[in-house]
Amino acid sequence: MSEISIIQTSDAPSAIGPYSQASVAGPFVFTAGQIPLDPATGELVTGEIEAQTEQVLRNLKAILEAAGSSLNAVLKTTVFLADLNDFAGMNGVYARFFDNHRPARSTVQVARLPKDALVEIECVAHRP
C-alpha cells in the first residue's frame, strides 16, 4: 500500500475544519472541496458565480501544484452549485482554466455550501 502524504500550501486557503487541502496516495492527488476563499484574507470572494468560480479554480491550481500536479493532470472534478441556474457562468470560467483538457465531471445542485458560497469544486488528479 502506498504511503499517504498530506498537502498544505499557503497559496490556497487553510482548511476550515478537520481536513487537509489535499492528500496524495501513489500517483493520485485528492483535493478537498474548495470554496471561493481568498488565501490572503480567508474571506469569501464576493460577487457573481464567475468571480467565485475563478477563485475556486485558482485555489485548486495552487493545491495541485503544491502536490506536484497540475490542472492538466486532473482526471475528475465534482462541482457543487448552490443554484444550477449558475451552470453557464461557472462553465465558462471552468472551460478557460481547463482549456483543451476535459476531465470527467459531475455537477450537482446542493441545498447549501459552506459560508453560503455559490460554488465548490473538488478534484482527483494524476501526479507524474
Image: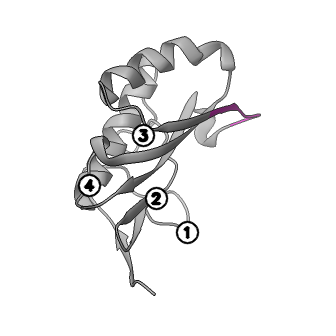
Range drawn in magenta: 107-112
Amino acid type of disc 1? Pro
Residue 94 in the image: above or below residue 28: above
Residue 115 in the image: above or below residue 100: below
Q: Could one spot residue 40 in this view of the protein?
A: no
Local secondary structure at mark 4: loop
In front of the other: 72 or 94:
72
Write down the residue under mark 4.
69
- For the residues labelled 2 and 1, say whether their Cβ atoms are less than 8 Å apart: yes
Local secondary structure at mark 2: loop
Q: Residue at x 33, y 30 (%)?
A: 98
Quarter of the view holding residue 86: top right
Q: Could one spot residue 80 in this view of the protein?
A: yes
Write down the residue under mark 2.
15
Q: Residue 99: x, y in percent? A: 29, 24
Q: Residue 3: x, y in percent? A: 39, 84
Q: Residue 74: x, y in percent? A: 38, 46
Q: Is residue 15 magenta?
A: no
Q: Residue 35: x, y in percent? A: 49, 40
Mark-to-mark CA distance, 2 and 1: 7 Å
Quarter of the view holding residue 4: bottom left
Snapshot colouring: one colour
Write down the residue under mark 1.
18
Mark-to-mark CA distance, 2 and 3: 10 Å
